[in-house]
Image (tube, rainbow, N blue to C red):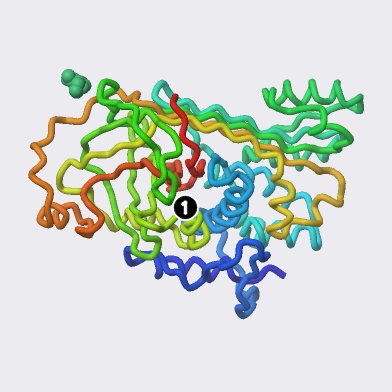
Amino acid sequence: MLTIFTLLGITVDAVLCGGFFPDLSNLTPNINVKPTLPALPNLNIFTRDCSKDYKDEFRRNLYVFSTNLYKRVAGVKENHFVLSQYSVWRELSAFAENTEGEAQKELLEVLHLPEESCVREKYYNAAKNLERNGEDVTLARKRVFASTRNQDSSWIDFAKRYELFDFAFIQGKNTEDALREVTKAVDASWLKAEHVKDKKGLLVDKMDFTGQWYYGFNESETKEEPFYDDSGKEIGRVNMMKINTKVKIAYLPVLNSKIIELPIGNDKRYRLVLLVPIGRTTVSDVIRLLPHTIIIDIFDNLMESAIALPVAIPRFEIKTEIDELRDLLKGLGIDKVWDDKSIDGVYQRSTLRLVEAGPRAVPAASPLPGLGIGQALRTGLAAAVGADFVANRPFMFGLVDEDTRTCLLTGAYSKPSLI
Ligand SMILES: *[C@@H]1O[C@H](CO)[C@@H](O)[C@H](O)[C@H]1NC(C)=O
């Protein structure tokens, strides 16, 4: 039986997110411990109304899964990576629809999917159509289930209808032929023979994101500058992009971090949220403490700063290939599905590239008055935190869909390079 945690979680989260600051009472203190669901009374006797809107619940449950997977991936990728939990969630949820018993129970629990299939379909609908390409944003995504076995066609149709994955039937052949076919289906040139050898079914997905800012950075303002580690030691150089703009910015006392959001796309349909720790707090500290409440909800309670603030972030491109997903998912509690032998590998490659480009310049702002407490008050920031946002030390980021506030990509940056 699935516990009711996901159901109650909504109410609890909603209350906790009513204030500015995330609650830290339900942290997972040790990331190596398999997360256990809190013991709550089983309220499954209540059936749920399938005509209701479940978008918000979907978003919150996806967030919990995303946070758990983020912690695992950060560990193996040394805090420098980009990851699309959203995609992993979608492809695995298809397997929740094609398994039963223990295997299904594990998937429902770890993915935070509801027990009622009609509510799950509401989630799948909410997850659709969040990635819209245009001249301003390129979002190239391929997500394929490549199988050497023929699969039930009504299940494949279901997966296609909700865009959970595309199906590629790889006819029983040698490793080399199979690799060629999988690579073609996913456009996944990074896969090697060892990824495919003796495998029955592979989930492979690929996401390349590059977008233009709503307000472009001025290229002639970009300067090569040092980048530091968490202890303040210079560890490399970056091309620092600069802009002076009114932004949503906040200080999170519980994480001792500054957080900012910058709109992306002509219609601001995406935003990049960046989080930089302050003082002795490290990115690892923040990741360890990362609450299951939605940090971006904070912004619903925040106004833009009243005046333009200097913002500096490195030009960056991160490309991450994750081969260990199956093991990381095992660590989260998905174990049985690999036994049934229709699927035995999960691979992902994500790329995020952000440079200065943007179609419009920031409108001329009134000149910055001298720094001081008065200004700090007007920006809404604690005076000690200053009145700017400079990402010249390891930071975390998330790419969020504006409509549904779903995280499409998340990651961390801690290995500087000049691009
Ligand atoms: C970009 O910066 C340069 C140098 O500071 C400046 O001369 C130029 O006017 C700026 N361009 C725009 C569009 O603001």
The kind of residue on which mark 1 rests is Val
Packing grade of label 1 (10 A; few <14, some 14-19, many >=20) is: many
Q: Is residue 257 left or right of residue 67?
A: left
Q: Quadrant of ligand 1?
A: top left
x then y, percent, for residue 224: 34, 27
Q: Nearer the viewer, residue 51 or 45?
A: 45
Residue nearest the observer in this picture, 319 or 246: 319
Whether residue 402 is visible here, answered yes or no, is no
The residue sitting at the front extreme is 233
The percent coordinates of residue 166 (x first, y second) are: 69, 32
In the rendered structure, the answer to whether residue 40 lies left or right of residue 131 reads right
Q: Which residue in the protein does label 1 denote?
A: 283
The residue that appears at 81% across and 43% down in the rendered structure is 344
| Quarter in which the C terminus is drawn | top left
Residue 206 lies, in percent from the top left, at: 62, 32
Q: Secondary structure at mark 1?
A: helix
